[in-house]
Amino acid sequence: MEAETPNESTRPQIIIDNSLKELLGKNHFPELLKKVNEILKKSGLPDLRKLNESSTSIMEAEAKNSTIVDGYVDLLENLSLDEKLDLISKLSESVKSDQQRKKSLFKEAFGAFESSKSAEEIIDDIRSSRVSTRQTESF
């Protein structure tokens, strides 16, 4: 059998294995952690503490969301089949109307300014509403 040459997908694993082999054998956790963080930094990834913090916050958010959903499911268990189906249809309509409302709000941001006032009246309103808080100091 012929020895396989490292390709792009196996090369990072070989680098990690060769550089950490000595530290793993000696159980030097601080040095091991430092070496792993160096490798992550070279790879453009955040260090282990940041990865751990972000994964912890994601897991906490997912746990809160699942707790909220579980609470609603517990409340809905007592509903009849017709009431559950009615709730499903209302939730579906709510999702559809939210999407349509977001699209219409976005489209409303474009277009011409509409007003019954003339351009001169609008300019006068803008100028009259200006407030100057500039205070000059005498020397």
Image (cartoon, helix red, strand yellow):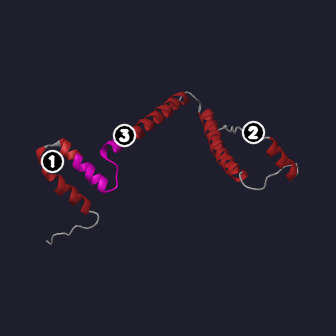
| Percent position of residue 7, x then y | 26, 67
Q: CA distance from mark 1 to mark 3?
A: 24 Å
Secondary structure at badge 3 equals helix
Residue 127 is inside the magenta segment? no
The dominant secondary structure in magenta is helix
Front residue of 119 and 29 = 119
The kind of residue tagged 2 is Val
Q: Along the horizontal axis of the image, is 66 left or right of 19?
A: right
In the image as oriented, which residue stretches furthest toward the left?
A: 26
Within-10-Å neighbours for mark 1: few <14, some 14–19, many 20+: few
Q: Which residue is mark 2?
A: 131
Q: Give the residue drawn at x 44%, y 38%.
A: 62
The kind of residue tagged 3 is Glu
Q: Give the residue drawn at x 51%, y 32%.
A: 73
Q: Tell me where the magenta segment starts and ends, as one range.
A: 34-55
Q: Which residue is mark 1?
A: 24
Secondary structure at badge 2 equals loop
Q: Give the residue drawn at x 23%, y 45%.
A: 33
Q: Nearer the viewer, mark 2 or mark 1?
A: 2
Q: Give the residue drawn at x 29%, y 52%.
A: 40
| Percent position of residue 27, x then y | 14, 43
Within-10-Å neighbours for mark 3: few <14, some 14–19, many 20+: few
Q: Which residue is mark 3?
A: 53
Instruction: Check the image and report above or below for 40 versus 131.
Output: below
Sequence-wise, the earlier of marks 1 and 3 is 1
Instruction: Check the image and report above or below for 137 versus 39.
Output: above
| Percent position of residue 97, x then y | 67, 45
Q: CA distance from mark 2 to mark 3?
A: 48 Å
Q: Along the horizontal axis of the image, is 64 left or right of 7?
A: right
